[in-house]
Image: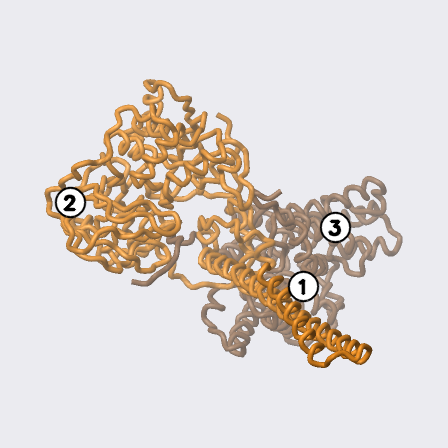
Chain colours: A orange, B brown
Amino acid sequence: MAQHGFPGGLQLPDWKHWSDDAPLRTLPVPPELVIPLDQPNGRSRLLLEPGDPVMRGQIIAEPGEGWASPVFATSSGRLAAVEWRLTAHPDGQRVRCAILHCDGHDTPLDSPAAALPHPLSLHPAELRRRIRDAGISGLGGAAFPTAEKLDAAADQGIHTLIINAIGCEPCITCDDRLLRERAPETLAGAAVLARASGATRIIVAIEEDRKAAIAGVQSAMATAHDVAVTLQTVPVRYPSGGERQLIRNLTGREVPSGALPIDIGFLVQNAGTAAAAWQTLRDGGPLLERIMSVTGPNLPQAGNVRVRFGTPMLWILGHLGIAWQGKRMVQGGPMMGSLIQDPRCPVTAASNCLLLADDALLGNSAVERPCIRCGECARVCPVRLLPQQLHWFARDDDRDSLRQHGLMDCIECGACAVVCPSHIPLVQQYREAKAGLIAADIEQDRARRARARFEAREARLQQRAEEQQQRRAEKREALKAAQQDDADSHKDPRKAAIEAALARTRHKRSKDAGSTDR
Amino acid sequence: MSFRPAPHLRPRNDVPNLMRRVLLALVPGTAIMVWLFGGGVLLNILLCSATALATEAAMQRLRGRPVAPALNDHSALLAGVLLALCLPPLLPWWMPVLGTAFALALGKHVYGGLGFNPFNPAMLGYAFLLISFPAQMVLWPAPELATPGLLQAIAFSGGALEIDMISGATPLDRLKTGLGQGETIIGLQAERALFSLHPDLRWPLINGLFLLGGLYLLQRDYIRWQIPLGVLLGLATPALLFWLIDPQRFADPLFHLFAGGAMLGAFFIATDPVSAATTTRGRLYYGLGIGILVWVIRTWGGYPDGVAFAVLLMNLAAPLLDRLCRPRIQGHS
């Protein structure tokens, strides 16, 4: 199929051979599970008390604020405590985690969601509900609740589902391994996601050097039945797996700035997510595990493992007999992954890879020098930004220029920082500048609202003052008229006073009635 | 464990390496200049390099910045060497020193050091010397006369020695003065043919070797093609046009491409990223502008070669070019 390409990009070292040979292994359940209650895009409400017993697959927290998935116990035992723990999330903050002490029996919940031998027979809305209830989130790294994306896609109407099996980052092989061993499940999952989202066409995208995975998909396509699937291979170039880059590469279409792929009729889902959707719907019960690459140079134990959510990285390393001391640990790839600060942090939906390496591979401790405007960053930028200019604007905190030069379109792929001969931490700088822009927007909005409130109050006060003045004027008029009458007709002064009082009361009543009406 | 955001991959290149490669690429052209013009070239390089490093160190110190990283990035050294290669080899020693000190102090550090200078420091130093000492700056020695003893005599005479008698004009000088006196290209070429083959081939040879070094930098991605190609096209296109119109009055494009500082300018001087345009398209226009200005100055200007002024003028235009040549961001219309 024709390639449309995408701008920029660069060749990175591959390093997939470290982990792509070994077959999938299933890790046992650890004695302690650490399950984050707060997710990258939302928070959830705990439904149990510490000390409560839990079963495998039992819901322990339901979605609260933001976009959250329900949280499940991934094995049986006891909810020991709720603690603030460090996870591998890039913001480096502690999150609330449920600490489960496992009993080792891995007893399933009595009444899990019913197994579905033929998920495709369900109505799309019912499929989406089941996917939501199963707690499925994107397994590509962002961990966004899948049902939210599917709902939005179904609402908006899309035509194409793209199954993203591109591991464009070095080191990560979980999707490669998945397609080698479980291509039929992945395609079946793709069909489920397509039905749930209303897509009529499925494209599976793989990097062209992943021969075994391509063969796996091809044979699965040969035996597959009712779905219109096409397989498209793309050249190996970072960041070809980025959502926008992938759509551009496969179809030549650009997702407009500030819009989402569904706005132009595409839904992109990770291959692991598709397989997970199929397995959980077919077998019933929620999503409890994922496939994670454990890799690094000179690591004989490297490979891909099926591991329960909440398993501490430290336990995995111990179980596999990996010496981690003195090495850097990264969750995800070396380009966009996050440095693990606490090795006890748990596996989550976002944990596609655990990378261990020393400074020779992952060090960027070299001195930072001034930008020499060599422009290499602009050459590799897949969004066609001018990182060298953004760098200057960010230094000057020149927000207008940052906006004009498209800072908010930056996908933080890190290509610019890797080619920078001055070793400037560009991505970090852009992230901070973005936060600054967003904060400025919020501040501006707040100021605008405060001003509107102030102006409304001023207007109200003024109106009240005018009304009062008018009332006084009327009163004076009435009094004057009464005195005039008095003088003219030589009436009884007592009668005149009574009449005046009555007039005042009438006037006041009508006023009051008017104001309560308002 | 320290917290550090992505990417974690070690950067693949660094500024000192970039500068070292450019210095390396200068070697063939420099070697042939030493061979053709004698030790004066080397002496200039020595004087300019030493002055450049000393000035860099002094300025960093004055500005309260660490000295070692600035010296280690080799940018000062490169600026010194580039300026030295533009200077005629028979100058009193204090001229290269003065020019280099000017280039580094007023061309680079007053703006904030590496990365902040709007002008190419080497060319600023050259222009300063050319304007201050026009007579000495255009005299290139006849090679057979440039003996080591004489060089010392001139270099350390403080500029008092009359040097007209031992220097020969470059082809660009001859062209300029000859055409100024109403001679024709053919006549000049006939006269040139009377010389030994040697002096005539000097500048093409030097330019050829700088071209070679430039191609090495291109091939290794240390520089990108937009600026050099722009310069060469900008120089050759008007030259070709006017030569086709009147070959009696205008030199042919090949002569222009291989004369004076054309190749050194196109591949080593105009490509200084700090003072050049930084957008891809902007760089092409930047190069074209330099090429055209070089041709204009050579043809109608007051100086025989115009690389320095062309580069400085285009330095001024670089920010504007970058504004006009912003690429369309993905997802924007």
Residue A101 or residue B67, whichever sits in front: A101
Image mark 2: chain: A
Q: Which mark is residue A1?
A: none
Question: Would residue A369 be found to the left or right of residue A18 on screen?
Answer: right
Q: Who comes first in sequence, dot 3 or dot 1? A: 1
Asked which quadrant contains residue A128, the reply is: top left
Q: Secondary structure at mark 1?
A: loop
Look at the picture and state if A361 lies above or below A164. Answer: below
Query: Which residue type carries mark 2?
Result: Ser
Q: Residues within 10 Å of mark 1 (few under 14, many from 20)?
A: some
- Identify which residue, B78 or B167, lies in the foreground: B78
Q: Which residue is mark 3?
A: B292
Per the rendering, the mark at residue A76 is 2
Q: Residues within 10 Å of mark 3 (few under 14, many from 20)?
A: many
Give the number of the mark in front: 3 or 1: 3
Decide if residue B185 is on the left or right side of residue A453: right
Amino acid type at circle 1 is Pro
* Residue name at image x 50 percent, y 57 percent: A434
User: Can you give x and y, in whole percent of width and height, for residue A377 in the image?
Assistant: 51, 51
Q: Are marks 3 and 1 in contact (CB under 8 Å)?
A: no
Q: Is residue A211 visible?
A: no
Q: Is residue A287 visible?
A: yes
Marks 3 and 1 sit apart, C-alpha to C-alpha, by 24 Å
- What residue is disc 1 on? B88
Are circles 1 and 2 on residues that touch, CB within 8 Å? no
Element assignment for label 3: helix
Looking at the rendered structure, whether the residues under marks 1 and 2 are on a common chain is answered as no
Q: Is residue A80 above or below residue A73?
A: below
Chain name for mark 3 = B
Q: CA distance from mark 2 to mark 3?
A: 78 Å
Are the residues under marks 2 and 3 on the same chain?
Answer: no
Q: Position of residue A58 (x, y in %)?
A: 21, 43
